[in-house]
Image: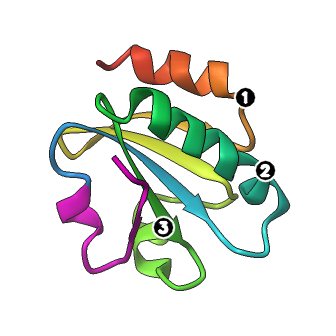
Amino acid sequence: MAITNVTDQNFDAETSEGLVLADFWAPWCGPCKMIAPVLEELDTEIGDKVKIVKLDVDDNQETAAKFGVMSIPTLLVFKNGEVVDKVVGYQPKEALAGKLANHY
């Protein structure tokens, strides 16, 4: 599966089913740029178990506010539309994979 860019308009639909990792990010954010290749690797390795979506907080402030995102990157793990885990800041791939594995 490929990483999907989402917006305020389609966020709820894209995170309503299954296990979804939502990356709240912005193009100017250094740590967001650092975590992008980690998310690409995770998508390659476990994309069959988890869907990864990215939401640009500059363009989609409504969704960021709804989930109380104050710093980026913030990664929220959704299971069938409910937030089940949260990570703020850069994380190595192993740490993220471990968090996601808790929810398969």
Number of residues whose C-alpha sits closer than 10 Å to that of mark 2, classed few (under 14), some (14–19) or many (20 or more): some
Say whether disc 2 or disc 3 marks the residue closer to the N-terminus: 2
Say whether disc 3 or disc 1 marks the residue closer to the N-terminus: 3
Q: What is the quadrant of residue 32 in the picture? A: bottom right
> Which amino acid lies under the numbered mark 1 shown in the image of this protein?
Pro
- Asked if residue 9 is among those painted magenta in the image, a careful observer would answer yes
Q: Position of residue 61 (x, y in %)?
A: 50, 79
Q: Residue at x 73, y 44 (%)?
A: 89
Q: Residue at x 37, y 76 (%)?
A: 7
Mark 2 and mark 1: Cα distance apart in space: 10 Å
36 lies above or below 47: below
In the image: residue 90, left or right of residue 40: right
Number of residues whose C-alpha sits closer than 10 Å to that of mark 3, classed few (under 14), some (14–19) or many (20 or more): many
- Residue nearest the observer in this picture, 72 or 31: 31
Mark 2 and mark 3: Cα distance apart in space: 16 Å
In the image: residue 60, left or right of residue 16: right
Q: Dot 1 lies on which element?
A: loop
Q: Residue at x 39, y 14 (%)?
A: 102
99 lies above or below 3: above
Q: Position of residue 98 (x, y in %)?
A: 53, 15
Q: Dot 2 lies on which element?
A: helix
Mark number displayed over residue 55: 3
Q: Residue at x 71, y 33 (%)?
A: 91
> Which amino acid lies under the numbered mark 2 shown in the image of this protein?
Met
Mark 3 and mark 1: Cα distance apart in space: 20 Å
> Which amino acid lies under the numbered mark 3 shown in the image of this protein?
Leu
Mark number displayed over residue 82: none
Say whether disc 2 or disc 1 marks the residue closer to the N-terminus: 2
Find disc 1 in the rendering and name its residue: 92
- Asked if residue 47 is among those painted magenta in the image, a careful observer would answer no
Find disc 2 in the rendering and name its residue: 34
| Residue stretch in magenta | 1-14
